[in-house]
Image (tube, rainbow, N blue to C red):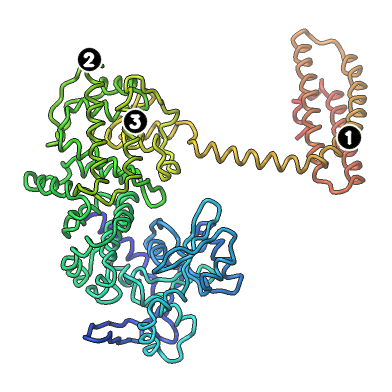
Amino acid sequence: MATIFKAKDGLLSRFKSLTWSQRFSHSLQPQFSREMSSSSLNYKVDVSKWRKVNAKTLGINSSVIPLPSWIVLKILRNKGFQSYLVGGCVRDLVLNKIPKDYDVITTANLKQVRRQFHRCEIVGRRFPICRVHIKDSVIEVSSFETVAKHAEGKEEILLSQAPHGCDEKDLIRWRNSMHRDFTINSLFYDPFLNIIYDYTNGMTDLRSLKLRTLIPAYLSFKEDCARILRGLRIAARLGMSFSKDTETAIRDLSSSVEKLDKSRKMMELNYMMSYGAAETSVCLLRRYKLLKFFLPFHEAYLDEQASETTVHNSMMLMKMLFNLDKLVSCDRPADCILWVGLLAFHQALVSNPQDAFVIWVFASVLYNGKWEEGVKFAREHAKDQVNFVPEISGFSEIESDEELAAKVTELASLVQDCVNGFSNETNSYMVFISKKIGADVCQIFDVLVNSIEIYDKRRKSFMIDYYLLGKGHIPETRFVLGKIILKTISGGHAGGEREVDEEKNGKWLLDSVEKSCHPRPSDLAKNEFLSKKNRKHSLANSDMEANLERTKKKKLAGKNHSLSELEPNMNNQDEVPKEESNQKGKEHQNVAESFQLAKEDTRITQENIPEKKDCHSSLEEVISKKINKLKDVVNEKKSSPRPLSSLFR
């Protein structure tokens, strides 16, 4: 609750700058209500409140847009089409949140969009969109035309109710906004003018952190029951509350979610679990009687726990989801195999409670990547302080490594059995998990089932590689899963031999290692790419450097001759004590090194001179100045000694 109040206070300060003067001069706002009738929808349009808001007043400008999305927007605009950011990304920018993705909408049709980009395909049947590949990113581009064609009957009603004298661009945006799910998702952002367009009172709902359907909630959820899950996901991540009619409709129509196909269920649940809002999402699913359609086993567990204790956070499942949320976010998501593996692990513990020390070793080996190191850490740090019921059966440190290996292997096998049950059609647990995902999750625990005592994949880095984690990389997922379990059973503390204990500083043991570890694998790949790019650049300039090198050698011959002429003058100086003589010898060596610096300065000067004639004259001037300074300092050495390095400043 405290988080929600803080968020509201922050939003109020961001919205203070919004005034009546920011409304459209033509005073148009389709704040309308739709009422269901037996044969049609009756639209009542209130033409008073269309708004355009200067995004700068909310701290938003085009610099926040990632480069791939910006490229798509700019190419479409340069080709004469209107292009905007739309939907959830605009909502998140207004709330000062990091968007999950950046969706683009344009006045071009999908075929026109596809012609503008080399790597672009049209996907989807009911609501086709273009997927544009820019570098390593995929940008989803929709068309105003697609939405209009999809709901031709509604379009006729909308056009009949359109305000007279309305600007054509406003009309296009308004018509599109009428087909969206929630008011806060119907905002358009024009990064070229830095203006946010609001046609549905979405900014007002954002200010009050209220989630409201654009049309009556019953009608909206009957049109697409997946909007119920989308609403819960948004509320969980942003700390929003539902309007009264929206909440009532969710409760009354929650059973319709069961009819969704498996892929849609998986997609929606993954959005809830992999982007930093797993704990709150599970709480909301349970509150609105929806958890049974996704996680029936865990719903029964939570119901039983709630009936036995009033301390919500004592539940092991919720603790693990909390620690999962601490590690992932919208800009650092995980692949679904992480949370599926976590749920399978928890289900195995509830079905077959385990000794706390066995769990310590299980998680330590996953985290450290080596059997011996995991066992050693568990023996040094495991304590009888875990109080999770029914998951933990007790604590008894097992002396024999052979017996310990057998028990850890047994636990890993139990987890794999739970994973296989998820994708089994005859099982009532999470049947929307595909066999491919189930097989990938089982791979996480294979190392604890097969030859566990010789397992040795010790990590070189304790930093999470979020690129690999998002791609479902098995070793990276295994490491993060072990980390979450260790943090849960240790009360937030976990680590390995190479980690520094920072409890005195109030930090988790893992955090210190992640800040000082080796580069991540994906970073090394990027560095290799940059290195290759620099080598190509060097090759491109090699011809010019070869020409300059020939000129440089001629001049350096003359310079060396001048240097040899100076040596007798230096040797003919009055005799000096031995110590001072040694000092002069060092200074002479510095002279030679300094001439090497002069040589480098000359090379840099040459590279910046466009013509050979100018290059020769400038080179002579530089060498002459250096030699004259050297003569002066040798002659004045006795009277005013100074470091020779000052010659080349």
Residue 369, horizontal then vertical, whole percent: 37, 27
- Judged by depth in the image, the label closer to the viewer, 3 or 1, is 3
- In the picture, the disc for residue 550 is 1
Q: Observer-nearest residue: 100 or 417?
A: 417
Question: Relative to residue 563, is residue 27 drawn left or right?
Answer: left
Assign the C terminus to one quadrant of the image: top right
According to the picture, the residue beneath numbered tag 3 turns out to be 367
Query: What residue type is disc 3 on?
Result: Tyr
How many numbered discs, if any? Answer: 3
* 3 or 1: tag closer to the N-terminus: 3
Is residue 28 visible in the rendered structure shown here?
A: yes
Q: Quadrant of residue 462?
A: top left
Which residue is rendered at x = 31% and y = 42% of the image?
A: 438
- Judged by depth in the image, the label closer to the viewer, 3 or 2, is 2
- In the picture, the disc for residue 400 is 2
Q: Observer-nearest residue: 638 or 481?
A: 481
Residue 315, horizontal then vertical, whole percent: 16, 42
Residue 414, horizontal then vertical, whole percent: 22, 33
Residue 644, horizontal then vertical, whole percent: 77, 26
